[in-house]
């Protein structure tokens, strides 16, 4: 890349953003943090460009499965492909190849493990994924700068430790941790971000940019962070304003005594589809967790409605056997494939499958299958798969169908035919807020009820709210929204207060994350 092309990319930075760039040019590891709308992405773009301009990152040859042969000595990485893709779009084309998610950077590969099941009286082979890049097979020596996007999502004991183990022993790495301490931590393991905030220089971006201030969603997000009761009425007013809104499910007719996923799907989302106010293929529904009143049931009800409306004998719903699980899909379904948004473009029978026979496809089939735990006790189902499980060739884990998807961001087509792959293929109309981190959509629906009480927190609500670019609709019980704002994962209003609280309580947090 020429210096001229770099100059064209340069923009004026505020003092805090400039300080982060200065740290980077001096080769100093640091943290760059800030809430929504404060310009973390802009600062990151500039520090990369200016490090290149100053000659700190010359062009190098890279020996890596997923990196370009000719690249640069920096990596932009994150837990999710979506978070990396969002930053990749902001960089010049010549630099985009150095943006890669953590699992690809560490070249995770499947490894078979065997355990004996007393219930089934046989050895069960499972596949887990381990990093091929480690201290015995380190990353290229030329990689010296590691920029970790959405670092609040990266767990300290496993994923970050795997990265440290994989860095070439002759390299003294420069780390730049990008993140927002207000977002929710990983599901398992304590986030690496608060630890690094205690160890490294910190640049905190506080100024909300003018274009961001014009967004009611950004205003709402910052009000939620400042807590209640100081601003509760303003929070309610903003939520109630068009194009945003709050749907209080407690005000629905008395016949809706049990507000569950089915009720919400039929009473609200299906009605919104009919009115053209919810596009299931472009908008997103977010929910605190998967089970109960969660993503699984909401996804199934919405997919079943769409199947009844759109499925035909030409594009039916298929019953798919993946191990002991039955799953239901049709061409056109929105899915999450390898943590990326995708659409199913074809489903066909897998000729290599020799397990339990599957039901004939149907245009009216609901998206509800057997309980996976009940299936473990089904001797006939097990015997139907036993011969396959004992086979050691590539057909061991074959599923009943081959499903091909087109990934939304990359337009890449990928086919899946093993039980592991198809069990990881999820309907994508509804996601957990955890899975949505690092992503954004034009219109977002955040759904919760009393069953989510333990999960609700200021960080969870803030993370859900900030996934929306233009429209936000909150669907839930009003008093729970207030309770959620009052519950903080890491308590305190300022960064110093939060870090002091973390120092005082880190032992308890680490214990919780291990359970």
Image (cartoon, rainbow, N blue to C red):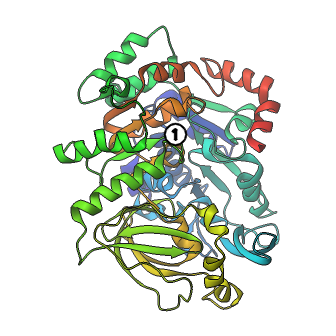
**What is the quadrant of residue 420 in the picture?**
bottom right
Q: Is residue 170 visible?
A: yes
Q: Relative to the observer, which residue lies in front, 128 or 372?
A: 372
Q: Is residue 242 above or below residue 61?
A: above
Could you tell me which quadrant the C terminus lies in? Answer: top right
Q: Relative to the observer, which residue lies in front, 197 or 269?
A: 269
344 with respect to 183 (left or right): left
Find residue 461 and report its horizontal and vertical position in percent. Answer: 49, 30
Q: Secondary structure at mark 1?
A: loop
**Looking at the image, which residue is at 37% across and 32% down?**
475
Sort mark 1 into few (<14), some (14-19) or many (20+) by Cα contacts within 10 Å.
many
436 with respect to 128 (left or right): left
Find residue 204 and report its horizontal and vertical position in percent. Answer: 58, 28
**Looking at the image, which residue is at 33% across and 30% down?**
255
Q: Relative to the observer, which residue lies in front, 342 or 351?
A: 351
44 with respect to 427 (left or right): right
Could you tell me which quadrant the N terminus lies in? Answer: bottom left
**What is the quadrant of residue 161 in the picture?**
bottom right
Q: Is residue 31 above or below residue 233?
A: below
Residue topped by disc 1: 288
Find residue 82 and report its horizontal and vertical position in percent. Answer: 47, 55
Find residue 421 and report its horizontal and vertical position in percent. Answer: 54, 72
């Amino acid at each position: 890349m020429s210096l001229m092309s770099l100059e064209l990319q340069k923009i004026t930075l505020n003092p805090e953003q400039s300080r982060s760039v200065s740290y980077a040019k001096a080769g100093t590891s640091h943290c760059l943090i800030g809430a929504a709308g404060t310009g973390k992405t802009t600062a990151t773009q500039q520090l990369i460009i200016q490090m290149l301009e100053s000659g700190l990152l010359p062009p190098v040859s890279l020996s890596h499965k997923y990196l370009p042969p000719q690249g640069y000595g920096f990596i932009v990485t994150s837990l999710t492909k979506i978070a990396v893709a969002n930053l990749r779009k902001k960089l010049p084309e010549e630099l985009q190849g150095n943006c890669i998610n953590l699992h690809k950077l560490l070249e995770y590969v499947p490894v078979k493990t065997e355990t004996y099941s007393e219930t089934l009286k046989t050895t069960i082979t499972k596949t887990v994924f381990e990093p091929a890049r480690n201290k015995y097979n380190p990353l290229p020596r030329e990689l010296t700068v590691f920029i970790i996007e959405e670092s609040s999502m990266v767990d300290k004991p496993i994923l970050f430790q795997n990265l440290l183990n994989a860095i070439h022993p002759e390299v003294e790495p420069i780390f730049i941790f990008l993140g927002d301490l207000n977002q929710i931590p990983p599901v398992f393991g304590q986030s690496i971000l608060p630890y690094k905030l205690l160890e490294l220089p910190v640049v905190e971006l506080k100024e909300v940019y003018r274009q961001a201030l014009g967004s009611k969603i950004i205003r709402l997000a910052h009000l939620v962070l400042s807590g209640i009761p100081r601003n509760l009425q303003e929070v309610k007013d903003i939520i109630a304003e068009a194009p945003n809104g709050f749907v209080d499910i407690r005000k629905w007719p008395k016949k809706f005594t049990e507000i569950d996923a089915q009720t919400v799907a039929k009473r609200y989302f299906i009605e919104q589809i009919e009115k053209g106010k919810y596009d299931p293929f472009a908008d997103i529904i977010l929910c605190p967790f998967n089970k109960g009143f969660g993503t699984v049931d909401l996804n199934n009800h919405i997919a079943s409605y769409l199947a009844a409306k759109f499925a035909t004998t030409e594009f039916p719903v298929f019953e798919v056997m993946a191990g002991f699980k039955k799953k239901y899909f049709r061409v056109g379904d929105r899915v999450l494939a390898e943590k990326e948004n995708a659409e199913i473009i074809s489903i066909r029978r897998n000729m290599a499958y020799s397990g339990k026979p599957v039901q004939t496809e149907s245009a009216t089939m609901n998206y509800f299958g057997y309980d996976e735990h009940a299936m473990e006790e089904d001797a006939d189902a097990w015997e139907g798969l036993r011969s396959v499980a004992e086979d050691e060739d590539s057909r061991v884990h074959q599923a009943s169908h081959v499903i091909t998807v087109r990934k939304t961001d990359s337009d890449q087509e990928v086919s899946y035919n093993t039980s592991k792959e198809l069990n990881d293929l999820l309907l994508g109309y509804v996601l957990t807020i955890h899975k949505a981190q690092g992503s954004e959509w034009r219109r977002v629906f955040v759904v919760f009820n009393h069953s989510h009480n333990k999960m609700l927190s200021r960080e969870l609500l803030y993370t859900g709210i900030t996934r929306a670019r233009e429209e936000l609709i909150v669907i839930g019980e009003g008093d729970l929204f207030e309770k959620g704002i009052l519950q903080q994962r890491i308590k305190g209003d300022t960064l110093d207060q939060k870090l002091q609280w973390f120092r005082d309580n880190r032992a308890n947090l680490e214990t919780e994350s291990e359970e």
